[in-house]
Image: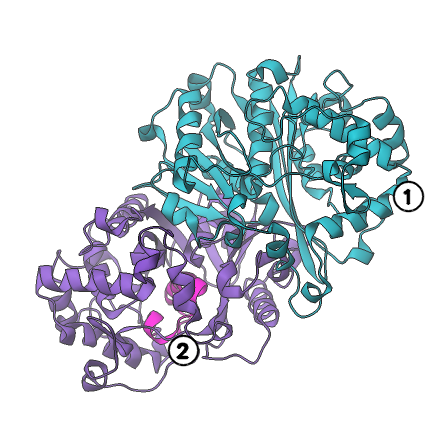
Amino acid sequence: MARKVAIVGTGQTKYATRRFDLSADDMVFEATSRALDDAGLTIKDVDAVVFGMAPEALDGVNCMDKWCSGASAAYGKPFMRVHTGGATGGSAAIAAAYHVASGLFDVVLVVAMERVGETPDAQRVLNRIYEPTLASEFALNIINVVAMGTIRAMKSHGFTEQHMALISVKNHLNALNNPFAHLQIRVTAEDVLKSPLVCWPFKLLDCCPRSDGACAVVFAAGDKAKKIARVPAWVKGMAAVTDIKVPGETGDTGWISADAALNAYKRAGIDNPRRQIQVVECYSPFSSMELMLYENLKFCESSEIVKLAEAGFGEMNGEVPFTPSGGVMCSNPIGATALIRIAEAAIQVMGKGEKRQVHGVKNALATGTGGSPGIGSASFTTAMVLGRDI
Amino acid sequence: MAERVAIIGVAQTKYEGKSSDALSDIIFDVSSRAIEDAGLNIKDIGSITLAAHDMVDGRAITSMLTAAPAGAHLKDEIRLAEDGSFAVALACLRVLSGEFTNSLVVGWSKCSECTGDTMNTIANLCYDPFFYRPSGLNDVISYAIQAQQYMVKYDITCEQAAEVVLKNRANAQNNELAHLKSAVTVRDILESQPVSTPLKKLDLPPWSDGACAMVISNASTAKKTKKKCAWVKGFGWSNDTYFSGEKDLSKLGSLYDAAARAYKMAAVTNPAKEIDVAEIHDITSFHELMEYEALGFCPEGMGGKYILSGATSMEGTIPVNPSGGCLSTNPYTAVGMIRVAEAALQVMGRAGEHQVPGAKTALAHGISGLSAQNNCVFILNKNL
């Protein structure tokens, strides 16, 4: 990109199973106002807005972006809504960054929201993402599809339920340091292994919660960004890649396409992520996904996953901390979740992480994942590399 | 805009009330033909922007099953839940950033799968569950309230609105892809079944099946193509409030803003003189009149007199909707994109039977949202 783009502010609501105290537009307003406050900007400074929301069947209101446009600072401004399932927040942020990179807008706000608490059973809604004549009838949902991918990865990479439990313990511990996190409970590996079985190999504490919440991020163009933020988080590389796979075609590395991260690395000039990236906010709603991402995001070979898991590779004091925020396993307002990864990665670069701050962050990676393999169906992956230096 | 982008390939399906093809087949058909029309290969396409609504497609994440036929495998793809014109805007931004050379945009709807009253129910579900939804509002009623306010404020008549239908349905007869191609008379329109005062059945579009795709490219690629292309001179889009009690329903607020942004970028100062042809989102006959005003073709409140002057007929100063518009063809999410595609075909000189002779500058317009909440405007030109 010819024009430099940076994140200059972030805002989040507290995530919870139900936000009875706030309606949808209230949540959007809270996240938007907090992001503008964080950047030291006002509504007048926003040139355009991108909105993210995933399946409306979760929220029970169709095109809720239209309802929330006023609350998202968009009245009288260019406004559009992105929807790529679980990757929505990442795709929306990338769309917003392209608004700035095009040269037509200087300050663009992206806000994403979901009220998963409105639906009695999110997995019934998510069954409807699959091909309607064959796959839906097969009772596929996100949990059992990821479980199938996990079983295959366990066999080929050698990680076990015990290794998955270590990831869960780490993420729940990290969430205690994040004031916005939904689940703030201390759990032991034994708690995870003994928690109720959901779909083998997943027990309840291997799985993310369903959350209500909203997140907003402000992007600004090069020169403006330097004036707005003391330390802007520069967008060094980004990509939103769609991968069409059927479950049998996914190979041993699981079903999450690595292409978004690889394309983002290329644009960011990163050839050795393990050395060049100091913190990762990855999209891993299930404990096993984080282990699969070690390899998928090129932090190690697949044969090293077990070794890294046992060495606490992704812990706060590990070699490369993964999800200091507690990640998707502790907060999952679906349409906003991938944007929260970007906000948290920006927070790390900007040095605003307080109790969850990783020291010496030069580059941070945020990823998003949506969709699912199925019969001719698409998985959406997003990646953004943010850096302290341009 | 420091850089320039152009539409270098366009494809549309034949629009119809009920297509026998599967949605994925329709999407594959237009996507591959748009790439072919641009003289490119799928390998040349760096980014893909899609426009589709889950509820209309009957799936929780429609692009999971529609991204593949749109060629998105291992491509940088983003889907909007908006009218297709907004997807064209995002594709332009992505090419303008310098990151992508060619961007494919695809929009579709297969409204025939929404049987019975489903489309109205989908629209009703757009309203908040506390205040608006229980009152039974839907998109048609939201447009009727606007039309009513507009009529009362400016003494617009049903006869004037009927002229819009008459014109667009007559134009559709020259468009081989149009859905409704039967001739109607003013009397047919005025005596058609009342739907929501003042709108009658023929003041409203049909529901259609179909898809549209186009390729947006950077200047160096566009200059190399052997075919004529449509240069994007300006584009703008804007948002109005969702709460109908908070706005002046007799005018299309965000269309004024979207047009001002597009005109500013394209350096259009006198649209009535500078624009040779327009394809606008005639979501109702009354809305086409309101759009004339918001786009600056005629002064505020003069839409009714303007249609009677014949200015927007095929022989007029600004032919509007030579393709027959939305009132003849309405594959919901694709409608605004079809307007952009038709405007592009006009400046490329490829509009066939409905070509406006010598069209150099064309305007296209799309609507997203109830009571025309969001609007998007493009100015295209034959020359760079």
The chain letter under disc 1 is A
User: On screen, A17 above or below A324?
Assistant: below
Residue B161 visible in the snapshot:
yes
Residue drawn 45% across the image and 60% down it: B229
User: On screen, A361 above or below B84?
Assistant: above
Chain seen in cyan:
A
Q: Which residues are magenta?
A: B324-352
Chain B: colour as depicted: purple
The answer to whether residue B336 is magenta is yes
Give the labeled residue for mark 2. B178
Residue drawn 42% across the image and 80% down it: B176
Give the labeled residue for mark 1. A156
| Quarter of the image that includes the N terminus of chain A | top right
Find out whether the residues at labels 1 and 2 contact each other: C-beta distance under 8 Å.
no
Side (left or right) of A133 relative to A11: right
Residue A59 place in picture, x, y as percent: 49, 49
Which residue is nearer to you in this view: B114 or B31?
B114
Cα separation, mark 1 vs mark 2, equals 55 Å
* Amino acid marked by disc 2: Ala
Residue count near mark 2 (Cα–Cα under 10 Å), binned few <14, some 14–19, many ≥20: many
Side (left or right) of A44 relative to B74: left
